[in-house]
Each structure stands twice: as structure tokens, then as C-alpha cells.
Amino acid sequence: MTLRLLRVIAPASLALLPLVVLLSEVPLVAGDQVAPVSAPDGLSLAPPVLPYSPYGTAKIGTRNVYTGTLIGAWCGGIKVAEGTSEFAQGRSGYGLDIQRDDPATPEKDGCVASEIVTFTMGFSEAETYRPDNPGEPVVWASGESEQVNLTAETEMTYLPLILR
């Protein structure tokens, strides 16, 4: 790591203060190519991994689900995202951001590229329908946003709570 002092060109009151810049490598430009720049220890210059963002309708059979119905996304048998349904323009729908699995943690907390994503609505497994790719399974892909409509065939039954 290299320590360099640079004089700041600014108003007179600030011009006397040196600016300390820590650089580990200076990028070299040759034509259209730029040499990679290394980050200081413990930092990464890699762009962040974007989540996979499915959205769509949420129905039980042909009927809309109730507003606030829990929608879960699962990868490898682990719930990796959860949200609730909303009602707008005569339809119930949802939207989720499913993060990538963090390789720095021992537990699974997200999905990996091309891993199959399954969904639940309430306590029921949901069938998926992708208008752009009907019949294909839903797979996790960083930065992708696509319509995935959900349908559960079993009705959720709510029983009254009777207190004595």
C-alpha cells in the first residue's frame, strides 16, 4: 500500500490542508484497456451482486388471495425471502427480492446461480407460471426481474378462536 500526500486546489482556507490518499495500485491506461485496481485490505472493488426479483399475481384457484398473505421463496429447502401480497387494480400480487447466498457465512441464506426457486403462499406450496417461459422451472439469476404468477390449489381455512 502506498501513502501519497496531495495538495488540494481549493479556497485559500483549505489549500493548506493536505489530502491523504491510500492507494495500493495506480491503474495503468494503455489504449482502451485499464489495468485492474486493487482495493485496500478488507475492501472489495467488485460490483455488488444484485438480487433476483420475481413479481406477479397470487391466487387460490382463480380467486385473489387476501391482502397480507405470506409469500415465501425457497432455495434448497431453505426459506430465503418472504413478503406479503398486496391488492391493486383488481388483482392480488407480490414482489420479492431474493438475495444471493453469502459464501462468507456457514449457513445458507440465499440462492446460487441457476438454483431452482420454489414458492409458498401461506402454508401451501404454490404452482408457478412464467408467461415468458411457460413450463420452465424458476431459477435464480442475479439482477433478473421477471413475472412469475403463483397459484395454490388448496384453500386456507381459518377457524374461530373460542376462549373460555
Image (cartoon, grey):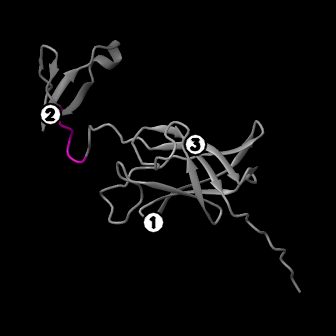
Q: Amino acid at mark 3?
A: Tyr
* Residue in the image at 16% along x and 30% along y: 36
Name the secondary structure under disc 2: strand
Mark 2: give few (<14), some (14-19) or many (20+) Cα within 10 Å: few
Q: Which residue is mark 1?
A: 77
Instruction: Pinpoint residue 133: horizontal percent, then vertical percent.
Output: 49, 40
Give the left or right position of residue 108, taking residue 61 as reference.
Answer: left
In the image, the segment drawn in magenta is: 37-42
Q: Mark 2 or mark 3: which is in front?
A: 3
Q: Which residue is mark 3?
A: 55
Q: Residue furthest bottom?
A: 164
Q: Mark 1 or mark 2: which is in front?
A: 1
Near-viewer residue (42 or 10): 42
| The image quarter in which residue 125 lies | bottom right
Give the left or right position of residue 48, taking residue 123 as reference.
Answer: left
Near-viewer residue (68 or 47): 68
Q: Amino acid at mark 1?
A: Gly
Instruction: Pinpoint residue 152: horizontal percent, then vertical percent.
Output: 65, 58
- Pointer 1 and pointer 2: residues touching (CB < 8 Å)? no
Q: CA distance from mark 3 to mark 1?
A: 21 Å
Instruction: Pinpoint residue 155: horizontal percent, then vertical percent.
Output: 73, 63
Q: Residue furthest right?
A: 164
